[in-house]
Amino acid sequence: MSDKTHLYVLWTNDNLITAKKMVFMYVVNAMANGWWENITLIVWGATAKLVSENAVIQGLVKDAQDAGVFVTACKGCADQLGVTESLEALDIEVDYMGVPLTNILKNEEALLTL
C-alpha cells in the first residue's frame, strides 16, 4: 500500500457528464470518506472556460471546496481564454502550472488525469 496521502487531479476534459459523474463525484466522496488526506483539483485548458460559464459546474466546484478539495487553475490557459477573473471570483487559485505539474510528475505523486 502506498504511503502517499495527496491526490492531484488534472482535469482537462470539458464534458459535463465526466465532470459530474467522475471528477466531482470522486473528489467529494474521497474527501468525505478519508480516502485521501488532501486533494488538489487542477483546472486546465477547456475546463477553465467550462467552470467560468456553467452555473452547475460552479456549484460543484463550491461543493468540492466545501469538502476540503483545493482547486487551482492554469493561469496561462485562463488568461488565453479570458476567464482569469471569473475563476478567481470563485475562490479558485489561478497560477502558472507548468512547473508544479512537472514537479508532480518528477516526484511520482498520485496523479489522476481526465
Image (cartoon, grey):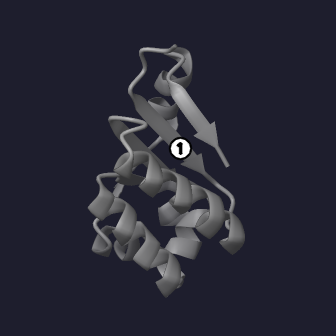
Residue at 57% of width from left, 73% of height from top?
A: 49
Tell which of 88 and 55 is nearer to you: 55
**Residue 73 visible in the snapshot:** no
Relative to 114, 56 lies left or right: left
Residue at 36% of width from left, 40% of height from top?
A: 34
Residue at 52% of width from left, 27% of height from top?
A: 110
Residue at 43% of width from left, 56% of height from top?
A: 28
Relative to 45, 17 lies left or right: right
Task: Give the answer, above or below, for where 17 lies relative to 97.
Answer: below
| Residue that label 1 marks | 9
Total numbered circles: 1
Q: What element carries label 1?
A: strand
Tell which of 73 and 19 is nearer to you: 19
In the rendered image, residue 92, in percent from the top left (x then y), is placed at 34, 62
Q: Badge 1 local density, few (<14 within 10 Å), some, or many (20+)?
A: some
In the rendered image, residue 104, in percent from the top left (x then y), is placed at 49, 26
| Residue lying at the far front of the rendered structure | 33
Task: Give the answer, above or below, for where 49 lies relative to 64.
Answer: below
Tell which of 27 and 61 is nearer to you: 27
Task: Give the answer, above or below, for where 25 lies relative to 5.
Answer: below
- Residue type at tag 1: Val
